[in-house]
Image (cartoon, grey):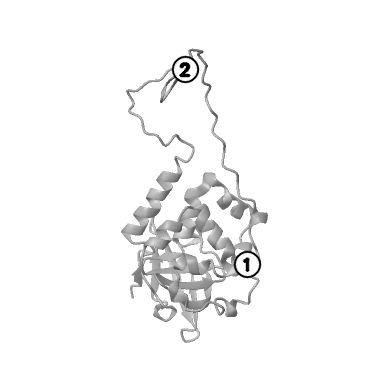
């Protein structure tokens, strides 16, 4: 029997994440666009020559070296859950008044997840799209990652990899925990997929090895399922063509 296919990202969301990645790759470039035919001497500025700007005294303009973006230290992240998982969001009145990101920010157990969203510059994407499902790993879920792997994700040079990891935690529609079943799978690129496993009469739902430990937190533009592990795309199995 063929499994039902769930898409982790609609075309719109993939496009916005891709565009965000393209924009971020130019963070250290001058944001002023210039035609290729325009040339400037070292003693010129956009407002005129430096001799004009300095009362006839010509000043040589040196090249300004780009400053590398610092790697976020692991020590700056919380690796512990400060609130019992079962009590998460219990102190939030009417969770549906917040979008998914603002709601995630309300829980100290999701502080690392929120920081990584910000590090990947995905805040605006999550806030402007509607009907999303977020699998939000707790702080302790990130603590389970090997230190070198987490350090790699925190390096701005590896922003694309971080975005890919976070993308695996977002579905482009609202899916309650009761709507998952073992005959589903979440497809990724390159014929990869994230398996879905449902057991204990539907009470235990596991997405790519991450079990939903706090389900169905309603937000204004979607739903949050808190999970106990990080879903890593490179660890999912290749799709069996016979299924």
Instruction: Say few, some or many: other residues with alpha carbon within 10 Å of mark 1 (under 14 / 14 to 19 / 20 or more).
Output: many
Residue 224, position in %: x, y? 47, 72
Find disc 2 in the rendering and name its residue: 43
Residue 121, position in %: x, y? 47, 52
Picture layout, residue 55 above or below residue 133: above
The quarter of the picture where residue 196 lies is bottom left
| Residue drawn at 57 percent across, 47 percent down | 155
Q: Compare residues 89 and 227 and report the one nearer the observer.
A: 89
Q: Compare residues 106 and 133 and report the one nearer the observer.
A: 106
Residue 76 in sight here: yes
Q: Gap between marks 2 and 1, in whole Å?
A: 55 Å
Q: Residue furthest front?
A: 55
Find disc 1 in the rendering and name its residue: 140
Dot 2 or dot 1: first in sequence order is 2
Q: Secondary structure at mark 2?
A: loop
Q: Is residue 131 left or right of residue 201?
A: left
Picture layout, residue 160 above or below residue 236: above
| Residue drawn at 47 percent across, 15 percent down | 51
């Amino acid at each position: 029997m063929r499994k039902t296919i769930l898409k982790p990202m609609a075309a719109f969301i993939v496009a916005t994440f891709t565009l965000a990645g393209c924009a971020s790759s130019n963070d250290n470039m001058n944001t002023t666009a210039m035609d290729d035919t325009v040339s400037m001497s070292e003693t010129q500025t956009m407002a005129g020559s430096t001799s004009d700007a300095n009362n006839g005294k010509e000043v040589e303009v040196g090249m300004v070296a780009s400053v590398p973006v610092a790697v976020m230290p692991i020590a700056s992240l919380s690796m512990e859950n400060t609130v019992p998982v079962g009590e998460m969001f219990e102190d939030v009145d009417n969770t549906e008044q917040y979008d998914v990101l603002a709601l995630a920010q309300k829980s100290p157990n999701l502080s690392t997840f929120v920081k990584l969203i910000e590090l990947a510059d995905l805040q605006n994407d999550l806030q402007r799209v509607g009907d999303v499902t977020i699998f939000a790993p707790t702080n302790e879920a990130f603590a389970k990652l090997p230190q070198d792997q987490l350090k790699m994700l925190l390096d701005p040079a590896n922003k694309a990899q971080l975005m890919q990891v976070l993308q695996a935690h977002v579905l482009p529609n609202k899916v309650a925990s009761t709507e998952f079943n073992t005959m589903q799978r979440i497809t990724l690129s390159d014929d990869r997929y994230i398996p879905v496993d449902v057991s204990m009469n539907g009470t235990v739902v596991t997405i790519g090895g991450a079990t939903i430990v706090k389900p169905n937190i309603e937000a204004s533009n979607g739903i949050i399922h808190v999970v106990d592990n990080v879903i890593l795309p490179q660890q999912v199995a290749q799709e069996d063509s016979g299924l």
